[in-house]
Image (cartoon, rainbow, N blue to C red):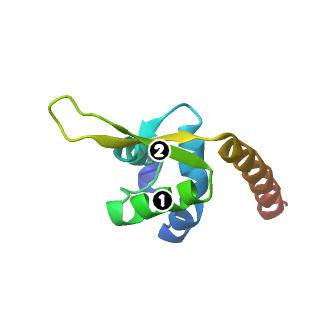
Amino acid sequence: MLGGGKEFPGTWQRALLPLSLLDALEAGPNHGYALGQILEARGFSPIKGATLYPALVKLEAAGYMESTWEDGDGAPGRKVYTLTGTGRGHLASQRELWAFFQEAVLRA
């Protein structure tokens, strides 16, 4: 939740989820649950697994990230996602488009 009790509309969250996941991965490899937590800290409402994991699968299928299994110490293993070079390029181009969009919307 954002300051002042405001939340991003659900349609915005769904539309920006792929870009936001790539952005969160730019800091380094991470697993799905942690990525969801990062996005919540940025103002997203809690992201259900039925929304998060299909988005991660699509981003991986597009070549923007890759995954490996990490063994758990006495716990189940987990999939760790890493941004690829293609993903970094896509993220950069999406940021440019986002800046253009933001400028167009906020133009007075």
Are discs 1 and 2 less than 8 Å apart at CB?
Answer: no
Q: Secondary structure at mark 2?
A: strand
| Res. 54 image quadrant | bottom left
Rendered location of residue 31, percent (x, y): 39, 41
Front-most of residues 89 and 21: 89
Residue 71 in the figure: left or right of residue 51: left
Frontmost residue, 48 versus 74: 74
The answer to whether 15 is drawn above or below residue 64 in the figure is: below
Q: Amino acid at mark 1?
A: Val
Compared across the picture, whether 70 is left or right of 7 comes to: left
Q: Where the C terminus falls, by quadrant? A: bottom right
Q: CA distance from mark 1 to mark 2?
A: 10 Å
Name which residue lies at 60% across and 43% down. Answer: 23
State whether residue 54 is above or below residue 31: below
- In the rendering, at what x and y percent does residue 44 appear? 45, 54
Classed neighbour count for the residue bearing mark 1: other residues with Cα under 10 Å, few (<14), some (14–19), many (≥20) = some
Seen at 48% across and 68% down, the residue is: 10
Q: Which residue is mark 1?
A: 57
Secondary-structure class at tag 1: helix
- Provide residue 46's location: percent of width, then percent of height: 36, 56
| Residue at the far top in the pictured view | 73
Q: Residues within 10 Å of mark 2 (few under 14, many from 20)?
A: some
Which residue is depicted at the point 62% across and 59% down? Answer: 62
Identify the mark nearer the N-term, 1 or 2: 1
Expressed as whole percent of the image width and height from the top left, the position of residue 50 reads 35, 66
Q: Nearer the viewer, residue 97 or 53?
A: 53
Q: Furthest residue to the bottom?
A: 11
User: 18 and 76: which one is in front?
Assistant: 76
Q: Is residue 91 left or right of residue 73?
A: right
| Amino acid residing under circle 2 | Ser
Q: Say which residue label 2 marks.
A: 67
Residue 8 badge = none
